[in-house]
Amino acid sequence: MAGKLWDVAKYWAKADDFILRLPDNGSIKGVDVPDWNHVEEIQPWGWDRHIVGVLRKLGAPDHLLPNEKQLDVIRELSSRKTTVRIMQELGFENRWCKNEDEVLNAIESFHGKAFLKAPWSCSGRGVWLGYNEEKTLLRVRKILREQGAVEVEPVHHRVADFAMEFWSDGKGSIQYEGLSFFATAENGAYQGNLIAPQSVIEEKILDFKVCTAQDLQRVRTQISAVLASIISHHYRGPLGVDMMLTPQGIVPCIEVNLRNTMGRVAIFQQKMQENADF
């Protein structure tokens, strides 16, 4: 794991696991590597071509690495097109627009104002409030030219942010790992996670009085089923689904992260603390 990311792997690593430490400067000179013959699986923070290239230079055999086709699938599933598919499956109105007319029509259907999102971006980047006007189209044209589509969704009035963390087995099954509660800036940039028992996190969410425990369970069940359908056969590893509380209740999918997340780190950090206290 690169930089400080390897620090957090200790929260879920087993006693006989090897944590690969990569320096911040990107150099692999002098990096301590495992005996690859005894490695059964590699679990990076997230898969992309860069980390595959680094691991290959460090001697990792191909059978432990995703191939080009698998990397393409992971990248495609990591786009906001997956968010749109999930939201549409659950009866929401998010739109996936491939040209200017589709974007303008979508904005108009949302009363002339909507959130627009680039297919690939994170931490609030590539997300902006758009109107049915030329200024919006200038940015839309750039995103369409560079990434081929734009997600358009209704404006939600945020009360709080939270997420559900899962593990996909790559064979069609999804395992729920827990709730995470986090803070964001006005532009959606991540600011930090609450480290607390699951009961405390659930109580904090319910304290906003916009959803019930039954609502949380329903969303968990629905999201698990959709993830099993569209993701789990194509991806093995951790994934987090960012959600939002609004005055109308839960918006069940703001973004899907096919990788480790700081929410997952918080869950496992709490588990380690509980085991130490025990």
Image (spheres, rainbow, N blue to C red):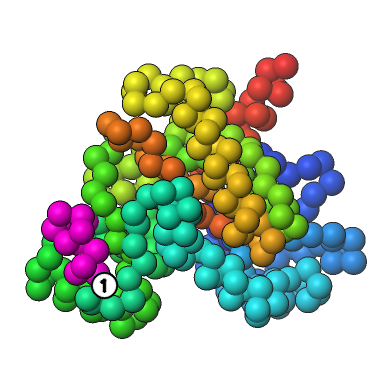
Towards the viewer: 153 or 24: 153
**Front position in the image: 105 or 154:** 105
What amino acid type should be assigned to the residue bearing mark 1? Glu
Q: Is residue 278 positioned above or below 256 on the image?
A: above
Is 209 positioned to the left or the right of 49 in the image? left
Q: Which residue is mark 1?
A: 102
- When asked about the image quadrant of residue 211, the answer is top left
Q: Is residue 71 a member of the stretch shown in magenta?
A: no
Magenta span = 103-114
Residue 97 coordinates in the image, percent (x, y) = 32, 71
Q: On the picture, is 47 further left or further right than 181? A: right
Q: Quadrant of residue 30?
A: bottom right
Q: In this picture, is 181 found above or below 126?
A: above
In front: 146, or 253? 253
Q: Is residue 74 left or right of residue 33?
A: left
Q: Residue at x 17, y 73 (%)?
A: 137
* Crowd around label 1: few <14 · some 14–19 · many ≥20 (10 Å): some
Q: Which residue sits at x=78%, y=76%? A: 62
Task: Give the residue drawn at x 24%, y 49%.
Answer: 155
> Is residue 111 located in the magenta-colored stretch of the structure?
yes
Residue at the extreme bottom: 145
Q: Secondary structure at mark 1?
A: helix
Q: Is residue 239 visible?
A: no
Residue 211 in sight from this viewpoint: yes
Residue 123 pos. (x, y %): 37, 54
Q: What residue do we see at 70% from left, 77% from top?
A: 67
- Residue 275 lies, in percent from the top left, at 71, 24
- The one nearer the camera, 27 or 118, is 118
> Where is the N terminus found, in terms of image quarters?
bottom right
User: Where does the C terminus fall, quadrant-wise?
Assistant: top right
Percent from the top left, x then y, of residue 89?
48, 53
